[in-house]
Image (spheres, rainbow, N blue to C red):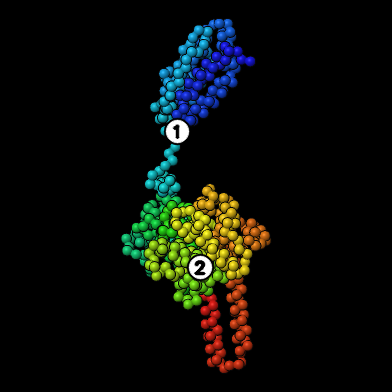
Amino acid sequence: MMTKAAYEVDTMVHRDSLGDLHAVQACPSGRMKMEELFRQWLSLEATKDMICGLVDDVKSGREVVVPTAHTNVSIIGGLAQTTSNPADPCRSPKRPPNHSPAMGPSRRKGSAGSVEDINMGMPEPLQLSLPEDAESDMSAMIPRFYFPKEGGRGRGRAYSRDRLDRKERDIEERFRQAGAGPDGITVDSFVSITKDLCGFPSFFNLPLFQRIRKLMLNLDAPEDDLSGRLLTLEMFQTYWAKEIQPFDNIERFFRLVKQPQNDYIEHSDFAPFLHELLKYHPGLEFLSGTPEFQEKYAATVAVRIFYMVDKDSSGRITLRKLRRSNLVEAFNVVDEEEDINKVNAYFSYEHFYVLYCKFWELDTDHDFLLSRDDLMRYGGHALTRIIVDRIFEFGRRPFARMQTLSPDEKQKLSYEDFIYFMLSEEDKGNPVSLRYWFELIDIIGDNVIRADEMRVYYDHQIHRMECLGQEVVPFEDIMCQMSDLLHPAIEGDFRFTDFTRPDKIRLSGVFFNVLFNLSKFIEFEQRDPFLLRQQMAEPELTDWDRYARAEYARLAMEEEGRENDTAMEIDTMDGWYGSDDDVDVMGSTEARASAEAPF
């Protein structure tokens, strides 16, 4: 058991150390470091010897003198120590440079080493500073990492003079290899420059050629007829130094697609690039004889781009949005891939076919506008009336159209609006679609879905279940199931972040299906384990990719069946009518087929 004298000595040592700890109360990191050093100091053999010596002094009646140490803190050199007694092998943890005795504990000794009084003062904040010579040394050691106005965040750091000279020689060599004459290069020979030197897809060739001539010649608009037009080496070098060399690939893409006077991309800016894609891509060659479907395909691609990239539905794609997307990569992939249907992002023809056919089936009068009754028939009347009304009144629409629509215009959905709806309905496993439905369910508009709002929608589901003879699930049970599914931070309050957590986002769509899509709700309750294994085998595919693939196969089979029926009908009627009647039968059959499908 520790004697009283030993206890007093140990108390003095600890209080002396506590003075250092209290001096760094205002700096948590300094306090942690001080505690670490104090533990190391206590574990030293010299410290143990010192404490034993102090105990012996107390036992023998000699005056107790605790060794002191004065130290300075240096970030560069670590811990620099200066002691009043250089021969003392044991040093206590160091005091901060602004420590003064008045701020630490004051100790007045009595006889036999007894401690009569201890006064603790509040310490000042710890101030750590670098010596002037150390600051200059550090600035010389740290390399420069920020280059203002050079491509943003150092992405397009300016070339050195030697590298720029090499690049200019490379440009001259490329022009020579492309067959450029003394007067310049033609648009057809410019393809290798576009793809290999500038890094753009090959179908960007014509728009790039037009943009360079427009800027260098100060034209009011791009030239439509480029036959006989040439691009000189000097014009391209000037454009390269201004629009290509200072920027990375993403910003080069951004600056080429947008209009020079804007700092954002609008949907019409993609038109010339998609026109060239339709003209030269081998997977879209079969559409060359149907300009109306080429136009619809281009419109579909543009809407899908804005659906995924323009997440706030402002109708504008900024450079920041572009960097956060895979759009530039998708353009490069579609340029290399001959099978257009393998590019699921934005460009798949099968996806376009499914979207267009679905719209065509609902648009019975073929005025390219859907009414509420038309949309009610979607998915075999899967949606409730209340959610259809909310879609027309408050649903997101592409290109910021919602802000400009009149009350009468809100009563119809265009083809572009329908794309937004269908992509959101068939794939509720991404933030864009979840935001689409979250805003519709949030009746109050306070960014929180509560039980009373959910009950408004679920009452319509209960009525549908009763009419169809389905077992009715009480709303209270639904609330418990949804809480167990999403685990919201506040019980009963569902915020958007609860739906987009990585471990919940693939299941969040069930929440919305329960409220307004009875078919998918029942499908989830009776889900097939085989389909679940199939989804796990192809994790790279989204719910929309799987739906479009299955729906395209179904539509293709129906189209093939109609063609077979038409052929059988013609064979049966052959010989029953004269030649004039045969022509009429063919005409009526074609008219009926065109009314059933767009192709």
Q: Residue 134: percent from the left, percent from the top?
A: 42, 28
**Along the line of sight, the residue nearer the viewer: 342 or 122:** 122
- Name which residue type carries label 2: Arg
Looking at the image, is mark 1 or mark 2 nearer the viewer? Answer: 2
Residue type for callout 1: Met
> Around disc 2, counting alpha carbons within 10 Å, would you say few (fewer than 14), some (14 to 19), or many (20 or more)?
some
According to the image, label 2 marks what residue? Answer: 385
Task: Name the residue furthest top.
Answer: 61
Residue 141: assigned label: 1
**In percent of the image, x 49 and y 9: which residue is there?**
110
Is 325 above or below relative to 286?
Answer: above
Front residue of 503 and 162:
503
Front-most of residues 113 and 249:
113
In this picture, residue 470 sits left or right of residue 345: right
Q: Is residue 305 left or right of residue 380?
A: left
Q: Is residue 49 above or below residue 540?
A: above
Label 1 to label 2: alpha-carbon separation: 68 Å
Q: Secondary structure at mark 2?
A: helix
Does dot 1 land on a helix, a strand or a loop? helix
Total numbered badges shown on the rendered structure: 2
* Residue positioned 57% across, 15% down in the render: 7
Decide which of 83, 456 is in the foreground and name it: 456
> Which residue, as the protein is rendered here, is positioned at the far bottom?
578
Residue visible at 60% across and 69% down in the picture: 468
Residue 466 drawn at (x, y percent): 59, 67
Task: Give the vertical position of 130 relative to 448 (above or below).
Answer: above
* Quadrant in which the N terminus appears: top right
Quadrant for residue 198, please give it: bottom left
